[in-house]
Amino acid sequence: MTQLLRRVLLSDYFVLGLSLLYVAAVAPFTPGFVSAENFTNILSALLPLLVVALGQTIVLITGGIDLSVTAVIGLSSIVGAMAMNHETGWLAQSPIAAPAGVMIMLLVGASVGALNGIAVAIARMPAFMVTLASMMGFSGLAVWLTHAKTINALPSGFTMLGGHTMITLAIVLVVGICVHVFLRRSLWGRWLYAVGHNSRASHISGVPVGGITFFAYVASGLLAAMASVLYTGQTETGSPVLGQNILLDVIGATVIGGTSLFGGKGKVVWTLFGVLFLKLVDNSLNLLNLSIFAITIAKGAVILLAAYLDSLRNRFVAA
Amino acid sequence: MKYKFIGILIALTMFATGCGKSGKSKDGLTIGVAFETLQTEYWVAGFDAIRTDLEKRGYTMLQAISNGDPNRQLDQVKNFITRKVDGIILVPKDAKSCLPIIKAANEANIPIVLFNRPADKSDAHSVAVVADNFTLTRETVSYLIDQAKKTGNKLQAAILIGDLGDINAVKRRDGFDAAIQGHEDLIDVVARIPTEWNQEKAQAGVVNALQANPDIGFIFTSSDFLLPSIVSALKSAGKYHKIGEPGHVLLGGFDGDATAWKMLKDGYLDATGVQDVYFEAAQSVQAILDLRAGKTVPDLILDPGFVIHQGNLDEKSKQMWGAQMAAKK
Amino acid sequence: MNAALQFEGIDKSFGNVPVLRDVSFTVGAGRTLGLVGENGAGKSTLMNILGGNLRSDAGKMVLEDRPYEPAHPKDASRAGVAFIHQELNLFTNLSIAENLFVTGLPRTAGFLINRHSLHQRAAKLLEQVGLDLRPETKVENLSLGERQLVEIARALSFDARLIIFDEPTTSLSVRETEVLFSLMARLHDRGISMIYISHILEHVRRRCDDIVILRDGQVVGEGEAIEFSTARLVSLMVGREMNQLYPTRKKAAASTPALEVERVNEPGIVRDISFTLHHGEVLGIAGLMGAGRSELARILFGLDRYSSGEIRANGKPLIRSGPRQRIKHGMAFLTEDRRHEGLCLDASIADNLMLVALRDYTRSPLRLVQSGRCRQSIDRLREEVLLSPRAHDKQPAKTLSGGNQQKVVLAKWLLARPSVLILDEPTRGVDVGAKFELYRIILELADAGTAVLVISSEIEELTGICDRILVMSQGKVHAELNRDKFDRERLLAAALPREART
């Protein structure tokens, strides 16, 4: 019996199973939950969140945390829109507006990530404080750039990246596979785990701990900017406050998936299932016509439950 | 390992496209109401008014609040569409990011009405119900000018202007200017205070204006939610007096919230232009019904609103949402 | 002989695996009994039964002529049985006094803690264990030895009459060990019975009245301590004749220098250290705790700074700091702190084994890890160091015994084929069987031409495996002895600080 429980709890597919159970449990009460349209809705809501959460997974594996992802999403959204829009953009009407705009947005994300990385890896400041400060600073900068105004009239070649679910799916698939191969198979991916498990032992064993840590924050910034491309495309509007409410979703989904806040543990599929589970809960509560406050409370409870399951799993590993 | 990942995403999409559709069991109409925020009294009042109106008609209301997140609002409206609502009433975050939302509703052939915040011009089609900001402001300010005439003195005046990115703020400023035009002999506008809809900025602006022009005797604010800032600035300058008392500064506002109601009742506020939330709610629902019936509906439905002042206080208080909110508390 | 505690026919199995079989022996009243055996012999299981963490399948225990069946650790402490563990169970952020009474803080008015009476009672207990510290001192400011004394004071606070010491000296310096032993002697004089568990057989023979040897869950020998020689204890524990404790060298050291250290200085840490380590040589560094041995090793491996001097590996001067450059020059460093600096405890055995050399197991341009080659190397390494075959590659390293953990750390360095191997306390917390396997591996490496630098607090170990020993004291090398001059007394004398020697 405990053997079975142990296998279930420790399985990679535990959260997927939980998601399917959840679907089965709430479907009878939730009108429209099990329908093609609704699953497409869930998919389109899940994809950009998955991209941010993958960046968060990379940072969590090293034992850090990146609270600045929401600021990156807002800042790169507004900077990208300033560059690309038809009316006042530097790239207005240019044939390369869309690809150049995406590059600019990714650059913004990578730069914020690099600043976080320098502060954490080289100045050895605590990740929580560094990224909290950069969240505040860069979301302030984003709002200041346009005095809180939004910008639209973006090139359609850009907005379809996030606005067309199938294109978004293709992009996220490629990103997901790259991150997966990186984590499981590449030298730097393996080192990421080692640093998260024990940075002192890794340093003594010749692992470039500082470089790896720096890289993790750059990757997280880059992926947050990638998510910003998708989110901005969805609403066809560059907004400095884009994504400012999703921090709980990002960290919550990653942890629900099984990535540890203490470092050394995390997988792409885990995070995928975590995001799926969170979005299923979110979507079904929405369909049940609950108020936003009730949904937030329910999501908090789900994340707490996930934290409990995580500690349960750790106990099973230790036993 | 990587095949697992692909497999799961593919399975998810197949699941998504292969499932059956669900039906709906209600006889009456179902209306989805999506608000960007419920964090100011005005939106709470609007939300309640719509709910009451729908209940009266025996309709079902689905609700969704997006807390300022347009992506979330898009998800929520898609959920409405999934649940096959018969119409959507929307308060968007801003005039631009709501366009994909309106397009999604258009594609699903579901009528969508924007409550109090119109969208930018585009090929997406929606109906907006908004207060007639220009006319209502002009009327409110005209009432104040009449009161000023009674004093017989030439008055220095100040106006608090909202965020000029917001079309409502622009219309209210224009209404103010139109009312003043032709009365320059009586009213001298010495301060135009930009607030960007921010209470701290409003307060600092009024304090500065009062320092530069201590004789200001006429203040109009483009929204009632800035009244507390004006009151505190007036108090610290020793200029906060009841109507009829010597030194009273003529005060006018816009919206008709609970603070304005209290100040009217206590005799400090001369007049405010009230957005008729109940009218707007009823018009929004009616517009959906008309659209469903295939009637032509104008893109913009104006709520004329009304001016409430010391002379019509009792008569109009039932229609003033701020008074109703105050009574509920 | 009066009995403090009797085990009578204790049986215990986990699943189908018998762990204890018909274990019977007696702890005499007021006597100290040494319990020895390899890891997995059943010592911890037996102690867990005694402490109320586990129930035996059959048999009984009698504590001072009364049947004793603890269902919970609380029952054990109520009955006067106290445990002093290897991993100390103190709250480091609390004061000594708070730790002493953490389960029953003296209170006034129901819930307020009465600090005055707390400190008075604590001071009395600290005096009994000879600890001259104020009761309000925070435990985090205490050395490991002092913390252990606090644990003993806690045992005395609830009138323990049987105290079990489980590997108490593992993390103690020589001096702290002596303090502990003299306290044990005082407790002995007060008539308190003790069970002493240790891998250091010299300590067991010196400190105990009686010895019981466990092997594979059975008592394979018992008697008074004076009846046993170390060699006999070892052969009983291991189950075969160990006529030679240390393997023999097959080859002599070469004369080519592998590591040259010239006048290395760091104020307050090391002074004027110069020596040459040759290929194929095993060089020991002896000294007391705090003599600067581990600090020197850290400097040699580029982990800490030094202000002057030169270090050359295989003839090339080491200029930049940091372990990566040292590894490139063929150096390897097994640190004394296995848990924090040696292993990634939660990571798998395989990941730990590959950590140092992983860079060489990748294919450009994406630097993807070649898992096939990794698997081959892991299998070869496991055979080389005789890692327990029961352990699975994907199992977390923390599930291994101390000896197997140390083999994993050693193996990960071997994969990089080092020419200079620095070992800091390589056999700390390792049981006897694994110790000899480690010695065999070290000497085979030396035979194959690796230069080995061994730091150890166990003089027997150094004299057993080294070709040459340097003795450090107060940051300086005070003596250098060749194998033919090895002598326990001389080594100890050289290790003592200057002032103490006169």
Image (cartoon, coloured by chain):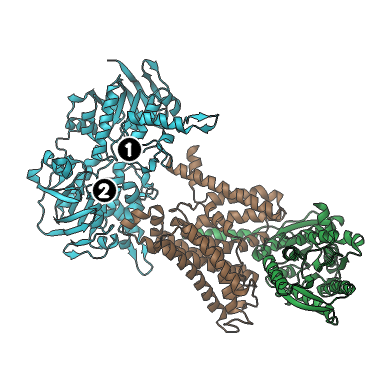
On residue C146, the disc is: 1
**Mark pair 2, 1: CA separation:** 41 Å
B151 versus B5 height, above or below: below
Q: Which chain is brown?
A: A
Q: For mark 1, name the chain.
A: C
Which of the two labelled residues, at mark 2 and mark 1, occupies the earlier sequence position? 1
The amino acid pointed to by label 2 is Glu
The residue at which mark 2 appears reads as C383
Give the percent coordinates (x, y) of residue B102: 72, 70
Give me the disc on residue C18. Answer: none
- Work out whether residue B244 or residue A10 is closer to the camera in this orientation and state it: B244
Residue type marked 1 = Glu
Residue occupying image coordinates x 10% and y 50% = C251
Spot the green chain and give its letter. Answer: B
Q: How many marks?
A: 2
Q: Quick one: which chain is cyan?
A: C
Where residue C260 sits: x, y (%)?
16, 59
Mark 2 secondary-structure assignment: helix
Vertical comparison of C145 with C368: above or below: above
Q: Is residue B203 left or right of residue B58?
A: left
Look at the image and tell me whether residue C263 can be seen. yes
Sort mark 1 into few (<14), some (14-19) or many (20+) by Cα contacts within 10 Å.
many
Helix or strand or loop: what does disc 1 sit on? helix
Tell me what residue is drawn at x 62 percent, y 72 percent: A238
Seen at 11% across and 53% down, the residue is C253
